[in-house]
Amino acid sequence: MVVIPEITLCSCEKTMPVIGMGTSVYPPADKETTKAAIIEAIKAGYRHFDTALAYGSEQPLGEAIAEALSLGLIKSRDELFITSKLWSSFADKDMVVPALRMSLRNLQLDYLDLYLIHWPLKLSQNVRSMPTTKENIFPLDIKSVWEGMEECKTLGLTKAIGVSNFSCKKLKELLSTAKIPPAVNQVEMNPLWQQKQLRDFCKAKGIHITAYSPLGANGTKWGDNRIIECDVLEEIAKAKGKTTAQVSLRWVHEQGVSLVTKSFNKERMKENLQIFDWTLTEEESNKISNLPQRKGFLFANLLGPHDFILELDAEI
């Protein structure tokens, strides 16, 4: 079984594995399929699992953890690192703690290791998924919502708190009033959307970056195959006897960030972990770093109408 390196987060006494398994899949999987995939992931060596209320995967993840304990695949829940997220419909100070308690009930856990604000915006109460319309999207009161997040940590409901999809501008606003700084900013990042300015800012502020969609979200309604079919990555993969996906994941890892991969395929799960016993040469790394950049997909394809998203993206 692969041993996954771990990192230390600020304001958190527990280390985090640098690769996690994402549980948001498209098209959506039924609960039994999700549970079975998580059990296989634990067998393969995954110990970090990324979920969210909006994914509908908290309950099957909780059931998988319980089964893994009963099967002896893990000796204690403490061996796992569990991340979940505050859905934007609950982005009010007084709703943060109740929302986290709801996630904990779904997961059958006493605490999370990391709780993130899912998006830097607020949604109407009736919105439970994306995309949505402009009328349902409102500015996020970062100061008050972050106070709710800090309360979650103070109460011992989560070991660490952080954000997702936050820009430098939004992080500056948060840091100006935060008593506990965010440990993590989880954002879309891959060789064709490298987020260098954001990575540099977060590094200077002690905020760890976790990359989602490190393979471009191929097979989803918002992603495509531009990573898997990238000529530069294919050339490097062929020369090293690796897959294009492994080259992409290795490059992301070498940027000093952690990553969340998403595959329910048993063999690809294993392949995604096989990136730690080899390195990219300086020349190979530079070729990837110099690839033409295309902005990430989620703002343009998941949140809503294109003209509004351009306006919203400029603000956040």
Image (cartoon, rainbow, N blue to C red):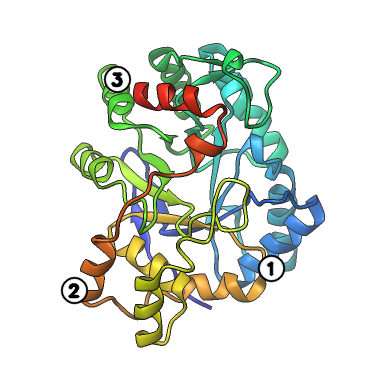
- Of the residues shown, which amino acid type is indicated by label 3? Glu
* 297 up-or-down from 246: above or below: above
**Crowding at label 3, few (<14), some or many (≥20) Cα neighbours within 10 Å?**
few
- Of the residues shown, which amino acid type is indicated by label 2? Glu
**Crowding at label 2, few (<14), some or many (≥20) Cα neighbours within 10 Å?**
few
* 232 up-or-down from 95: above or below: below
Residue 217 in sight? yes
Taking the spot 28% from the left edge, 57% from the top edge, the residue there is: 256
Question: Which secondary structure lies at badge 2?
Answer: helix
Give the alpha-carbon distance from disc 3 to disc 1, as whole Å.
Answer: 45 Å
Taking the spot 61% from the left edge, 63% from the top edge, the residue there is: 263
Q: Decide which of 107, 304 is in the foreground and name it.
A: 304
The quadrant where residue 80 appears: bottom right
The label nearer to you, 2 versus 1, is 2
- Of the residues shown, which amino acid type is indicated by label 1? Gly
Counting from the top left corner in percent of width and height, residue 299 is at: 48, 35
Residue 97 in sight? no
Q: Decide which of 284, 31 is in the foreground and name it.
A: 284
Left or right: residue 192 compared with residue 123: left
Q: Answer whether labels 3 and 2 touch (C-beta < 8 Å).
A: no
Residue matched to label 2: 282
Question: Which secondary structure lies at badge 3?
Answer: helix
Q: Answer whether labels 3 and 1 touch (C-beta < 8 Å).
A: no
* 149 up-or-down from 30: above or below: above
Counting from the top left corner in percent of width and height, residue 118 is at: 51, 32
N-terminal-most mark, 3 or 1: 1
Q: Quadrant of the C terminus?
A: top left
Residue 173 circle label: 3
* 152 up-or-down from 298: above or below: above
Counting from the top left corner in percent of width and height, residue 51 is at: 60, 45
Residue matched to label 1: 72
Give the alpha-carbon distance from disc 2 to disc 1, as whole Å.
Answer: 42 Å
